[in-house]
Image (cartoon, grey):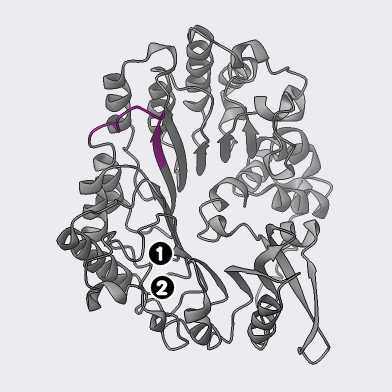
Amino acid sequence: MTAPSRPPLPMDKHPFEVLEHIVAELDRPKDLLALALSSRTFPDIIIPHYIEFRDIRCDPHRTTLWNSLAARPHLAARIRRLELIPEYAEAAGLRPPNIKRKPIIPGQFADMPLNQSELRDVDGKKTDECFLALAAAVKEMCGLVRFRWERNHTCSPTLGSVFASLIESGAPIKELGADLFDDNHGGWPRRLFGKFINEIWCFSNLTKVSVEVGQKDGLAPIPEQGRKITQMLIARCPSIQELNINFCDRPAFDELLEDGHWPMLTRLTIGERAIPYYNNYIHATMYSVRMRHFLKRHDNIECLCLKGKDALWPGALQEAPMDADCEVLLLETKMLRSCVAQIQHGFSPGLIKHKHLPKLERLSITVSDITPYVDGILELTHLTHLEGVHEIIDTHSQGLALLEKLAILPKLTYIKVTVNGQFRWVTLERDQGGHYTGVWHVTRKTEVRGENLRSTEWGGYRRLLFD
């Protein structure tokens, strides 16, 4: 005879260690909140000690916050996402507040003021103090899965200690964003910046990566600034899904195109500093072949943003003949849903066709005259957003005629055109059957925010900041 089964043990009867282990497995605050509301047992654990220590987004100059976290390693270990952004511009009214950039600070530390004198640091001493305090706190953040450093007003030699602590913590970092800028502030020797750039890339198994390295106007690029980045991505990060690269190092970029292979890559952004300007037709053709083969290997890419002016046709020599190999860079990316690229003069209009881009929903192209490409665009039946139509529609009948012609596309809703002398998004109004009514209006601000009409973000790299 089988013994009767025991009823499940009520949650409040489980040992505290078991309950805490359950809570520790949840990363997102919304999941923690849902669990807290599901039982009277969990709120006392989650609300004061966990839910406020999953995400932190603030200025790296909050020295008091970092000192407090370093002194409480059990709290620092609960942080999953750390995003370091400059707060001074918004605090001083130099930039309007952005809800997506709003600082996120644990409630018990929210009253710690941001010392703006540290932000206006001239000799770098206070910045060094801040970064060393930050490094001590990061060392205790062993649960981090995302780390983002957005360009701040200055760099410092002690910034290397922050990345060293990140690696030393043993945190399972999956998402890494680093926007580094060499402004030679505080007299930081450029050789030290170059040494720093080449020593911090010791991560592995990353899935989302955004790396930008820039320098102040007039400063030459740091030699080989992208070599270590490229080697890290190729050798130790086979599962990359989203990638944003923007550094000035042609050999490293060529190596990335030639040897990079990430089967799970779905979003790719290549910045203007990464895409070289070629004044040699042979070198330009070699770049085009590498890019075509790279895209062929990555046929799962859904969002592609090529910011450089020579991204698609890099010949840059008007007298150079068009080469067939240089003309078919996108033919293998049939999963593509959004594309941002400049198209050079003479690029074949035949590139933009449904058979080449059957799933394309968003297209941003930079051309002086879009007319030769209209027939191809009209084959993109899934298209919802189109940027690159410079025609004036409020005073020119030719512009209105083009707008009506494009409106034949059944899903096209947003087009960027010239209205009142300004390049603006307009919304096409349709009836219940989806037919264009002949009426359009300038896209409202709420629509712009909701539809993400900032085409430079369609590649997805900003998701590392704000998703």
Contact between marks 2 and 1 (CB within 8 A): the answer is: yes
- How many labels, in total? 2
Given the current orientation, which residue lies at the most extreme left position? 282
The x, y position of residue 209, in whole percent, is 43, 49
The x, y position of residue 89, in whole percent, is 66, 28
Q: Can you tell which mark lies on residue 427? A: none
Q: Can you tell which mark lies on residue 300? A: 2
Q: Which element carries disc 1, helix, strand or loop?
A: loop
Magenta stretch: give its range: 212-223
At 28% from the left edge and 27% from the top edge, which residue is drawn? 194
Q: Can residue 359 be seen from the camera position used here? A: no
Above or below for 231 versus 298? above
Given residues 54 and 7, the one toward you in this image is 54
Q: Which element carries disc 2, helix, strand or loop?
A: loop
Q: Is residue 139 left or right of residue 292?
A: right
Above or below for 404 versus 458? below
Q: Is residue 51 left or right of residue 241?
A: right
The x, y position of residue 359, in whole percent, is 51, 81
